[in-house]
Amino acid sequence: MRGPPARTGPVFRVKALSKTYRSGLLEVHALRCVDFEAAQGEFVVILGPSGSGKSTFLNIVGGLDRASSGEVWFKDHQLTAASEAELTRYRRDHVGFVFQFYNLVPSLTARENVQLVTEIAHNPMPVDDALALVGLSERRDHFPAQLSGGEQQRVAIARAIAKQPEVLLCDEPTGALDSRTGIRVLEALTEVNRAVGATTLVITHNAAIRDIADRVVRFADGRIAEESRNAARKTPAEVSW
Amino acid sequence: MVISPLRRKVLRDLRRLGAQALAIALVLAAGVATLILGNGALDALTETRARYYADSRFADVFADLTRAPIALIDEIELIDGVLQAEGRIVKVGLLDLPAMAEPGSVLFVSLPGEGGLNRLHLRRGRMPDPLSADEVVVSEGFADARGLGPGDRLPVLMNGQRRELRLTGTAFSPEFIYALGPGDIMPDPRRFGIVWMPRHGLESAFDLRGSVSSVVAKLVPGANEAAVIEKIDRLLAPYGGAGAEGREDQVSHAFLDAEIKQLGAMVKVLPPIFLLVAAMLVNMTLMRLVALEREQIGLLKAIGYGSRAIAMHYVEFVLAIALAGIAIGLVAGAWLGAGMAQMYARFFSFPFLVFSRDPQVYGLAAVVTLGAAVAGAVRAARSVVALPPAVAMTPPAPVAYRRNGGWLRRLLGLRQTGLMVARHLWRWPLRTGSSVLGIAMAVAILVASLWSFGSIEHMIHVTFGRSERHDAQIVFGDPLPASAAFDARTLPGVMVVEPFRAVTARLSHRNLSRKLTIIGKPPEPHLSRTVAPDLRPMAMPEAGLILSEALAEALDVRPGDLVEVEVLEGPRPVLVLPVSGLSVGYVGLSVAMDIGALNRIMREGAMISGVNLQLDPALQSDFYAAARETPRTGFVGVRELTVNRFRETLADNITIMVTVYVALAGIIAVGVVYNSARIALSEQGRELASLRVLGFTRSEVAGILYRELAAVVLIAQPLGWLIGYAIAQAMVAAFSSDLYRVSLVIGREVFAVASLAVLAAALVSAALIRGRINRLDMIEVLKTRE
Ligand SMILES: Nc1ncnc2c1ncn2[C@@H]1O[C@H](COP(=O)(O)OP(=O)(O)O)[C@@H](O)[C@H]1O
Ligand SMILES: [Mg+2]
């Protein structure tokens, strides 16, 4: 087990982040003045009811969406001031994503899906290592349609970590999976977090997951309502689901 | 009025897929337009000609002779099958316009009598007074080109004598719809006109009192033309009859026929291409729409809509597109048709043009187009009917991709994105094939139209560069002793003189025969050469004939075969001669032999019909003036003017045609590429947005889609070249007649230009789709399952 992180400065610094969606006369305040920091290698679990702004937060931090106001810093890059091209660069070089619906390319095999990312990465790990890390070595030549949901999600994780990203952002990675499969996916995530040392943010509905995190952040109504730190992280297998 | 929800969905779909629908509608419109244009022009020409021929009592049989007493006409009228015969005086003369440096010629024709044949259609002024000696009407085209009108004077040389004629009017004649001057290969109204005058004026000018030099006859409907011609020939033989011919050999009629034949070929080739491509586009687009809307279809079925009603809904969507296409096509077709009619009016001298807006043509175009569109919709409609509601509401089975062709991947060094492209194309072979075929058609249309430029240049090169190399040609009114060549040498500016002898004859082989002029040339001609298929000049054989390839084909003979030669002038010898060789030639049929041998056959001594000349360029106009003065000069031809006119006329017509074809090919190319791109984007939008999330740039993501399009476009090129070549070959076969022979010369630049034009159209479509790629919503694809 690794001790409390923060060996260096924070990887993310979020200050007074707000996001307002406007559709016609209707205004939705998805995020209201959120402050947040995450340290190098930290494993943060984000909880909260549906519609509380979790995805919006993760998307902005991941450079997929833009803030309405406030500042987001990744190390010394200010994402809130970055251009479209700089955000693309940021995602490409530093971020690994895992989503609820995997978003694999159906016309590429597991191995090829991972290669898709390593081909454009600076310092990727060998593709087979990434697949081994998520326990999918034997199925690497299967197309997504030939894999189960859990296996597809593990391919997505392999794809996300193969470039050795500095941050790993996961939006409900177990949302579409049954709980046993979910455990395997979460095991893969913690395993990766340990192996690669990527700062990991995981959104989930499953409160039981909190015990495997360094820190748990709870969103409610566009705000961070509660934050708690685990003194000692459990392994997913120790957690009672 | 209550619009049913499904009908409303048709309207929404049309709006949503507006650009795609428009692209398809435009391809359909191109089909409709070409159908209307082609059929309309074809009808217009055929109708106009038929009506004009009937109105003006155009003759069925034509015969030229030296001189026969007018009483012979009565005997001709007694021939079984002849309804009416008319004797005329037809003679070539020279224009003597001082303002005109280059020589021009006129054809004098005696005015048809009251109730006669080939009646004139007066355009301006009045007919000449039958008793006047100098009043004439001239052909409208000539008057127009030279700015002449009633009251103007026309100085001419008639039989070597200067005369000043007075124009009383201008007219059209069915005999000269296509008015080709002597020695010309394209009508040039500036340098050639018809002059009609009362016959007594011509009688005295040409020493033909009480005689005729031409006979025309109208036949009883159903008469045996060949039998009549044979009897006329027998009657005219003692009077220097040069062999009667039916309408199909009459120059103006034959050229019109060739044009009509070409149009007919165009009508058969072009519209089907467009309709086929449109049907493929409809099929592609609708299949995709149905795939996207499976769940809606299942829902509709579940709530009780019949399969038929739902299938009809998609057919209605297609019908709406087809109707738009038809509407655009009808307007464009009518508009282009009017332009085409104007082109004909310029080229052919018709007093009127019946551009029938035949509702049948329009109706046919509409029905055929609707048929093509619906045919394209059938597969999609059937798949709608076949979809069980329960299955429809579950998500579609994942697309099964296959790993294969690993060696090919390694060979191409494909990256994963390239692999995506390859697998995607391979997964829908039918659709990929349709797109490839569609683009190939665009390339093919271009190849099939662009080659004509090169071919014409090739024909000009062979005809005027290799073969007819003289600067000018003097044709004598009647054959002269060979010493006349020395006289020609004394004209100013003449550097080289080469005599020739021209003799009208009928060549026969088995049951095939052709009437034409045998040209006698020196053994080793320098100016007017006969050129072998390998473009090497040929020496004249001692005894045999050199036939142009077209003539050899028409008579079905090969070198070594014997042909029967029946000379139709002078002592009219009949003999058998061997075919010694074949030559190339593109306009008309030709046969050449040694001038000495020809003169021996004619037994009239060493005679020549004219001379070919090489001129000192500095003294050209002096030469023309002097040549005009020479009393024996029948007419003077100038190679440069002939070439220029040829090039000009063809260039005009072909430029118009090629412009139209390029536009049509562009419509196909844009339509196919744009639709393929939209379909690919709709299928892969999710994947592409996911790639953007992973950090692929907009350009990289667009590149994936573009590579797919590029693959389709590139694969289509060679196929397009092949199809284009085949179409060109079919066109050559369709265009070839006794009058023209087209050489199929397709240079590499034709393929290159065709491909570049289609690539440009593809680039335009790619640019049109770029905005949609840039706007791919990354966040949306993360929220939803496919
Ligand atoms: N594109 C959008 N347009 C309008 N409202 C949006 C959009 N995306 C999210 N929202 C709204 O913002 C709020 C936060 O959404 P989200 O971050 O997805 O919540 P969570 O992930 O916590 O379920 C919700 O009320 C949602 O309806
Ligand atoms: Mg969410």
Image: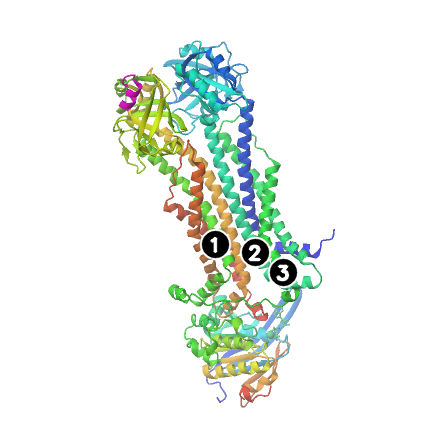
Q: Are marks 2 and 1 on the same chain?
A: yes
Q: CA distance from mark 3 to mark 2?
A: 18 Å
B484 and B84: which one is in front? B84
Q: Are marks 1 and 3 on the same chain?
A: yes
Please state the horizontal and vertical placement of residue A90, each as a whole percent of the image: 47, 71
Q: Which region of the structure is painted magenta?
A: B595-606
User: Mark 1 highlights which residue?
Assistant: B436
Q: Which mark is residue B561?
A: none
Please state the horizontal and vertical placement of residue A170, each as a whole percent of the image: 54, 77
Which image quarter holds the C terminus of chain B?
bottom right
Q: Please tell me which of labels 1 and 3 falls first in the chain.
A: 3
Q: For the residue marked with disc 2, what is the amino acid? A: Thr
Tell me if the residue at label 3 has its CB under 8 Å from ligand 1. no
Magenta stretch encompasses residue B597:
yes
Q: Main secondary structure of the magenta part?
A: helix
**Left or right of residue B568, residue B778 in this image:** right
Q: Is residue B642 visible?
A: yes
Snapshot quadrant of residue A175? bottom right
Residue sticking out furthest to the right = B1
Badge 2: residue crowd in 10 Å (few <14, some 14–19, many ≥20):
many
What chain letter is assigned to the residue under label 3?
B
Q: Which mark is residue B386?
A: 3
B454 and B423: which one is in front? B423
Snapshot quadrant of residue A117? bottom left
B52 and B693: which one is in front? B52
Q: Which quadrant does ligand 1 occupy?
A: bottom right
User: Mark 2 highlights which residue?
Assistant: B285
